[in-house]
Image (tube, rainbow, N blue to C red):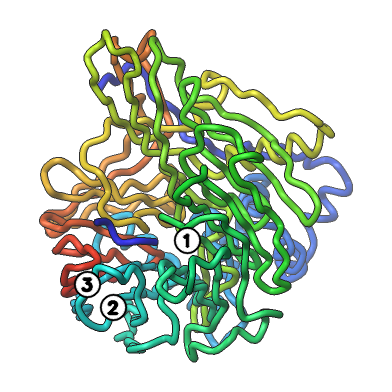
Amino acid sequence: MIAPKLDKRQTTAVASLPAVKADMKDPETLTFILLPSELLVEILRHLDGRSILRCSSVCRQLNRVIDSSAELQYHIELALDCMLDGPPSTVTVLERLEQLRTLRRAWTLFEWKKEVRVPMPGFCHAYELVGGVFAKTSSSGSIHHNQSGSRKFVSSWLPSSSDTGYTLARDDIGISTRDFAIDPSQDLIAFVQSDDDFVNNSNYTAVHIRTISSNAKHPEASSPILRTLTPSIMTSAFIQIVDDVIGMMFWMELDNPRITIWNWKTGQILVDRDGDDLPTHINDFCFISNRAYMITRGIDGGSIQVFTFGENEIIHVATLSLPLLKSRHFVHCAIHTGPFVARCLPNTPFWTNQEERMYVLSVDYIQMDPHIPRARPKFFLFFKNSTPLRYIRKYREQGETSPFEVPWEEWGPHESRMLHHQVPYQWLRYVHGYRVVFPLLSSSMQVMDFNVRKTKRHVFPPQPDSKASVEVIDYPTIIFSDCLFPGPIETNLPYRVCQRDELEGFSGVMIDEQRLVGLKSPSFADGDMKDLHVFAF
């Protein structure tokens, strides 16, 4: 990604699992319950965490068995925290369970364990934060007017609460780059080559597939370079990696946006759509999974369109409408989510379930009627990945052939949260899983956690010397805008908001599974980035 040049009328109940009612007189039920505890654990360990939790409500005997098993408790805790177990290692299940609970407690109370400054001097042309690795490209010296790309690459494995981290710097990666994306779990980096290296206005875009560790061709890639024809010079681009695919949305001097998705392992182009094939008024593009994506459109009040794709087809699954407007507006919708990783990182006991994530829609309404004052209301809209995934599953299960047209009233009020836009984000990577960093007018930052659960496992007594402010927002947000909407807009998705004074004064704060990363100085392509302030949980 390129560096940047209320009303409490009702309470929304947090979703809970339904209780399981069992007939204790049924012979099969009795036979199961009377099995030795070791056999019960062996059977239950093959269930997912949510199913195990439901089983604990069947009877006291099952509840005792489940409570006394560290392995079953670990599966439950993983599910509640939207995490997945890591690969086998010398770390025992009991140790993993303790680490998981410790991490949950730290985030719930918003109490990080240490703060470390990581030097990151010099320019920043493009940057990434994925899987605990912060990376940036920059020029090795001052930026010339005829140079748009960067050849220097720095990657830093950031410190955690238990590790010190380290930094790898390469002064010249051999090509001039416009943008890049990384997946440390695959030792993968994709460089978008800059026009600086092309002679006589070359008519293709090149993406180089390399390893982070060696800067050599990635061993799983059939070709070191992915290419697509482009009729004119690229003006901007944004690239993303999801497992075995790389997607890029880019703009050219004389053309509308274009979306290209490759299978980086085989080199095959899976999606290649330009102005003739794409809907009009497209604003942004974002992956849902390695075989599904969303685009945002700014016409007819704004919408989110959901697509699936494969080797031979692209299917429009659903269109989710934004709130109805009172008058004609052009709507600009930028969408952002956390990065994807293909697998659990080395030496990590557990990792975030990649299907459990938030999307943040930055919505800017622009008045089109010249007789009405040109106010530009701005909002943030937060929603979970479960919303588009539900329509994808429904489309497949019902064998549909036409996309679902989903009005705002059907999905928005109870599956999203709309808030007034206060301060624009200067840095991306402000989303990870269900947590989102939210900038405030006070030059401070707060973290919003949309994984709200009211269980004893998530209740920690506040510490008397705590520096954090924590509040659960489980009541509606109601937005009144007579000039924009026909009526009030109510949204109800619950979240926990956390804030600390130490997060004041940053131009941006990024987030990942184990840390917050603060940046004091705005970083532009010709500015000094200085230090990263790492808050490790």
* Type of the residue with mark 1: Pro
Between discs 1 and 3, the one toward the N terminus: 1
* Type of the residue with mark 3: Leu
| Whether residue 475 is situated above or below residue 116 in the rendered picture | above
Residue sitting nearer the eye, 354 or 327: 327
Residue drawn at x 31%, y 71% as measured from the top left: 147
Please indicate, yes or no, whether residue 102 appears anywhere in the rendered image.
no
Query: What residue is disc 1 on?
Result: 339
The Cα atoms of the two marked residues, 1 and 3, are separated by 19 Å
Name the outermost residue toward the front. 200
Locate residue 341, reporting x and y percent. 54, 67
Locate residue 417, reporting x and y percent. 40, 32
- Which label lies toward us, 3 or 2? 2
Q: Residues at badges 3 and 2 in contact (C-beta under 8 Å)?
A: no
Residue drawn at x 73%, y 41% as measured from the top left: 315
* Type of the residue with mark 2: Ser
Q: Secondary structure at mark 3?
A: strand
Query: What residue is disc 3 on?
Result: 532
Locate residue 76, reporting x and y percent. 57, 58
Query: What residue is disc 2 on?
Result: 139
Name the outermost residue toward the right. 27
The quadrant the N terminus occupies is bottom left
**Side of 305 relative to 462 (left or right):** right
Few, some or many residues within 10 Å of mark 3 (<14, 14–19, 20+): many
